[in-house]
Every structure is written in C-alpha cells, then in structure tokens.
Amino acid sequence: MRFKAYEETDYDAVCRFLVELNREDRKHINWNWARFEWMYEHPDFDRSLLSAIGTWWEGERIVGAAIYDMYFGEAFCVVLPGYEHLYQEILDYAFRELKDDSGLGIAVSDRDQDRISQVEQAYFSVTDQKETVMELDLERLETPPLPAGYSFSEVDFAKVDSREIQWMFWQGFDHGDDVAEFEEDYARTMRAELKVRKHFDPELSVSAKDPSGERAAYCCVWFLDGTDYAYVEPVCTLPAHRKHGLGSAVVCEALRRAKKRGANRAYVISDQDFYRSLGFRTAVQYSFYWKK
C-alpha cells in the first residue's frame, strides 16, 4: 500500500477506480467517473490544486482517494470495498490538505451508517446541506416527440464553434441575453477553445434545433463501455423555447442512445420535478458534514 500525490498521468487510473467503486454498490454514485471527467475540464475547476489530490494505491490500482470538488472546501473521500481501514487516514488527509478558510465539507450517504459514524468521530457535524441523486430504469424510458419544425442534431465539441456553444449555455443557464456581458465572461475565462473531454461521445451529445436552425435545447449523457449506467450532465433549454417539451425530448433521446449502447439505468444529481416527470426517482440522499 502506498500514498501518492495526484499527477495528470493518473487520470485514467482515477477513472478506473471510480468505475470499480460504483460497480456493485451505488451508495457513492454521486461521485462517479463521469462527474470527475466533467469537473476536470470545467472552466471553473482550479487545476493549480491538482497535486493536492491524494491517492492510495495497491500495486497498479487505486483503492482510495481524497479529491476536492472544483476547488478547496468540499471533497470526496472514498475507498473500495475491503479497504475501509484506510478511510480514517483519507479523511484526515482531506481535512489537512483540501480545506479552505471555512473548513471542509464532505457528502455522506444517509444510508451509510459506518461512514456517518466515522465522520462524526472525526468531529465533522451534519448540516442542512443536501445532495440528491435520482435514478431512472431505462426500461421505463419513453421518448416524447419534438414539436413540429424542431429536429435533433448531434453536437461534437471538436467540430463546432466554441462561442456558439458557450452562448447557448450562457442563455440556457439563465445568465441573460446581454451579448456584451457574455463576451466579457467568455474572454475572462479564455474559452476560445472548448475542451473536449476524453470520454466524450458526440452521439450522446444531443441538441434540438428550431425551424431556423438555431439550437434551442441541449443534453449530454455520459456512458462508458463496461459499465451499465449513464450519467446526465448538463441539460439546458433557452428561455424563449421553454414550455414546449424540448428539455424532455433531448434528455430522452440522449438516454435512448445510451440504452442502445448498453446502459440499463441513468443517474442525475438533482431533485427537480422536471426529472421526476421523466420517471426519475430518488436513489440516494446525501447529507453534508462539515468540520470548521
């Protein structure tokens, strides 16, 4: 058993670790390979802190990890089954190396009594902050039709104009329609090149175009061969096109494609009624425990 500070060459090993973590027991499904990959190339992710990520290895295999979420202050502390004896060490490391000025918060499944006992013994206190993961059995998936005049279109980030896609996200996530404000943010975050994540599959990146050819809604689904689940992130609809069923249509179309690839269930980190209307149900509820 050895500890190793994270290096960028460890990326694939972390993904394999997270796949194995969620293969049998889904109580850690809020922290899966797709969420890690989405975060890793997000413009707000603080890459200058990467070497603070802690990994615990047995041979060539990661068996435990402490990983911050976007920046210091919140972290994920997880171990593979059979390596629970490492958890306290990993928790201590996370508090020492990944806290910010307010301390450290970690999310623990409400049904994981062993972890709850360990974090409480380490003087973490439960708060009102929650995180919910919802699940959909893809056998129950229905694909609603698009409104007349709209059509599905794949979005390949390697081939589309970065500014066009970021403008869609800007409006879809309710930042407004002020072009000057968008351009200022675009320049500040230096998103001239939209990063393509390693396991991105353009077939699972689905938009709905309006009759004029403009993108009106978008959903991306993440699926990895050798797993049995898909992960939904992100989903947005431009304000002018809401209330027409476009969000439901792009989510279900992307999930239909993932099902065809081998996924039998899907997960999303949300508690929105929108997902409940598609058949998603609460799978795991997490509470945040904080140590000042």
Image (cartoon, rainbow, N blue to C red):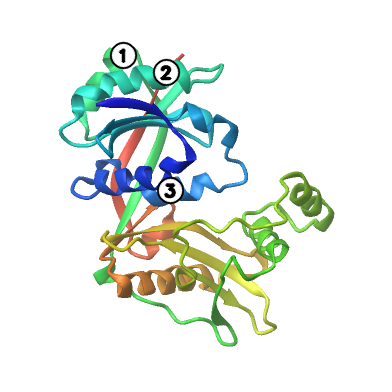
Q: Earlier in the sequence, mark 1 or mark 2?
A: 2
Local crowd size for mark 3, using a 10 Å CA cut-off: few (<14), some (14–19), many (≥20)? many
Determine the residue located farthest toward the front in the rendered image: 59
**At numbered mark 3, what does the secondary structure look like: helix, strand or loop?**
helix
Label pair 3/1, CB-CB below 8 angstroms: no
3D distance between C-alphas at marks 3 and 1: 27 Å
Give x and y (percent) for residue 170: 68, 56
For residue 271, side relative to residue 234 (left or right): left
Determine the residue located farthest toward the right in the rendered image: 180
3D distance between C-alphas at marks 1 and 2: 10 Å
To which residue does mark 3 refer?
35
**Who is closer to the viewer here, 282 or 23?**
23
Give x and y (percent) for residue 123: 34, 12
**At numbered mark 2, what does the secondary structure look like: helix, strand or loop?**
helix
To which residue does mark 1 refer?
122
Label pair 1/2, CB-CB below 8 angstroms: yes
* Amino acid type, label 3: Arg
Give x and y (percent) for residue 156: 56, 70
The picture quadrant where one finds residue 273 is bottom left
Give x and y (percent) for residue 134: 34, 52
The picture quadrant where one finds residue 147 is bottom right
Determine the residue located farthest toward the bottom in the rendered image: 148
| Residue that appears at 33% across and 36% down | 286
For residue 212, side relative to residue 37 (left or right): right
The disc placed on residue 95 is: 2
**Who is closer to the viewer here, 234 or 86?**
86
| Residue that appears at 36% across and 74% down | 256
